[in-house]
Amino acid sequence: MREILGRRRKISLRRRGRTASLDAALVYAGRWQWRVVPGVGLDRPVRRTAGAPGCGCGRPACAVPGAHPLDPGLLAATRDPRMVRWWFTSRPDAPVVLATGDRVSAASLPAVAGARALEVMERLGCRLGPVLATPTRYVFLVAPYSLPELGELLDTQDWVPTSLRYHGDGGYVALPSATETPGPVHWVRCPVVPAGEDTPWLPRIDALVDALVRAGRTSPDGDRLRY
């Protein structure tokens, strides 16, 4: 009996030691089969200066502050729960970053334009998938698309704003951690797993691109994703 109680106590302590990032990463990778990797996050306290925090990688001109893999050696995102558990146990405060282009892709807009696009699409009755917000952008998760497919869609537009970004093969976006209170990255529309399925439903990019392009035209262009 002592051995059983001792074993239960160890399991309880181990569960209490798990972090929100690890719990979220295990759902994304293990249950939904999305490839994830620990992110670098925004700058650590020792690097903070006046103004908005920069990227934790320390590069002043980082193109995607906070939303890329932590180390160059961690570029191989995975859906293997064992690797995910090891990564986020070793790096408990690391944000979860999704590698796009495999099971899921994305498109993103600056926050104001993204919120406007979401409102319009909901009013029109568009069937939307998961939508998340970062400190400066709205990210719409969609089914994977190829570059030729995307090129054909954009070729029908008179003008495509550079404030609208596409996250396909080789891209990364930050994902929310499973916390009770909204963090800097949080779901605006939570993923919904249909009955009998194992993964959240995702719309096709062609169902959303017109609304995203129109909303993006109202926002200033920019050269940084800014987390």
Image (cartoon, grey):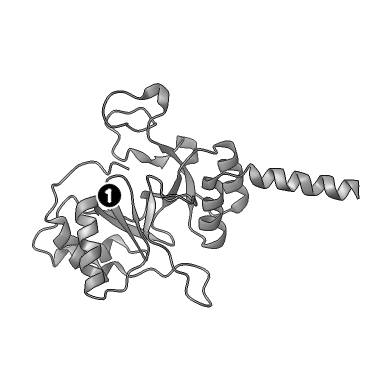
The count of marks equals 1
Q: Residue furthest front?
A: 181
Where is residue 162 shown, x and y percent of the image? 17, 50
Residue tagged by mark 1? 137
Q: Name the residue: 45% across, 43% down.
A: 95
Q: Would residue 220 be found to the left or right of residue 60 on screen?
A: left
Q: Would residue 189 be found to the left or right of residue 159 on screen?
A: right
Q: Is residue 70 visible in the rendered structure shown here?
A: yes
Name the image quarter holding residue 122.
bottom left
Where is residue 202 shown, x and y percent of the image? 38, 68
Q: Amino acid at mark 1?
A: Arg
Q: Would residue 71 be found to the left or right of residue 216 on screen?
A: right
Reply above or below: 42 against 36: above
Q: Nearer the viewer, residue 102 or 42?
A: 42
Q: Name the residue: 51% across, 62% down.
A: 32
Q: Nearer the viewer, residue 198 or 112?
A: 112
Q: Name the residue: 18% across, 67% down.
A: 210
Q: Is residue 153 visible in the rendered structure shown here?
A: no
Reply above or below: 72 against 15: above
Where is residue 118 shown, x and y percent of the image? 25, 63
